[in-house]
Amino acid sequence: MYKARKTFPMPKQSLNGYKVYGIVAEDKALSCDTFIEQWSHIEKRADTLGFVIFHQGAQSNYLVLCEWGNDNELFTRVFVQSAQGWIEDSNLYSFCVYDMTVMHAERELYIRYIYTDNPDTEAYLSSYYEGHNAHQR
């Protein structure tokens, strides 16, 4: 059953030009250290814009990496923290309905600032989905 999760931008946590968002399943602080450690091991696309979601789920941690490419495509990779470490397996894991809230908002920002006759990278990188708390629906 769907229950809203706290979703929020993390502009002070920018990672090499990627915007960062947090999602938490329970009403507690997001622990960023494990996500940042995993981030340092991920190969990123060259010369692209993107965003990353640190999703502290009910059962596991999910790092969702989204990178714009080929003009209007969103390349997405999902890493899940397991007892054996971080796993990337698209046959087992994907983004979820909570991540899609951020993805939709980022789509709108991308169209407004990048996928236009006059792209404005700085405006895109400084614009965030403002999020919602778990009590909103």
Image (spheres, helix red, strand yellow):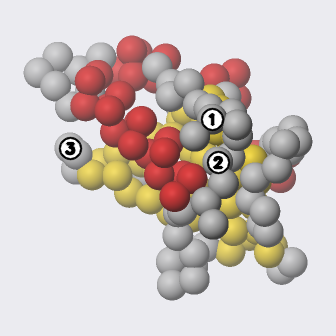
Residue 122 seen in this snapshot: yes
The residue nearer to you, when weighing 122 against 30, is 30
Q: Which residue is mark 3?
A: 71
* Residue 103 vertical position relative to residue 122 in the rendered view, above or below: below
Which residue is denoted by mark 1 in the rendering?
Answer: 136
Q: Are marks 1 and 2 in contact (CB under 8 Å)?
A: yes
Q: Secondary structure at mark 3?
A: loop
| Above/below status of 129 relative to 75 | above
Q: Residue at x 69, y 68 (%)?
A: 80
Q: Are marks 2 and 3 in contact (CB under 8 Å)?
A: no
User: In the rendered picture of this protein, how many numbered marks are placed on residues?
Assistant: 3
As drawn, is 79 to the left or to the right of 96?
right
| Residue of label 2 | 4
Which tag, 1 or 3, sits closer to the chain's start?
Answer: 3
Crowdedness near tag 1: few (<14), some (14–19) or many (≥20) residues, C-alpha within 10 Å: few
Mark before the other along the chain sequence, 1 or 2: 2
Question: Element type at marker 1?
Answer: loop
Crowding near the residue tagged with mark 2, few <14, some 14–19, many ≥20 C-alpha atoms within 10 Å:
some
Callout 1 amino acid? Gln
User: Residue at position x 82%, y 50% from top?
Assistant: 26
User: Which amino acid is tagged 2?
Assistant: Ala
Nearer to the camera, 105 or 110: 105
Q: On the picture, is 98 further left or further right than 62? A: left
Residue at figure coordinates x 66%, y 54% from the top left? 3
Q: CA distance from mark 1 to mark 3?
A: 34 Å
State the CA–CA distance, disc 2 to disc 3.
Answer: 32 Å
Say which element carries label 2: loop
Judge whether residue 54 can be spotted in this image.
no
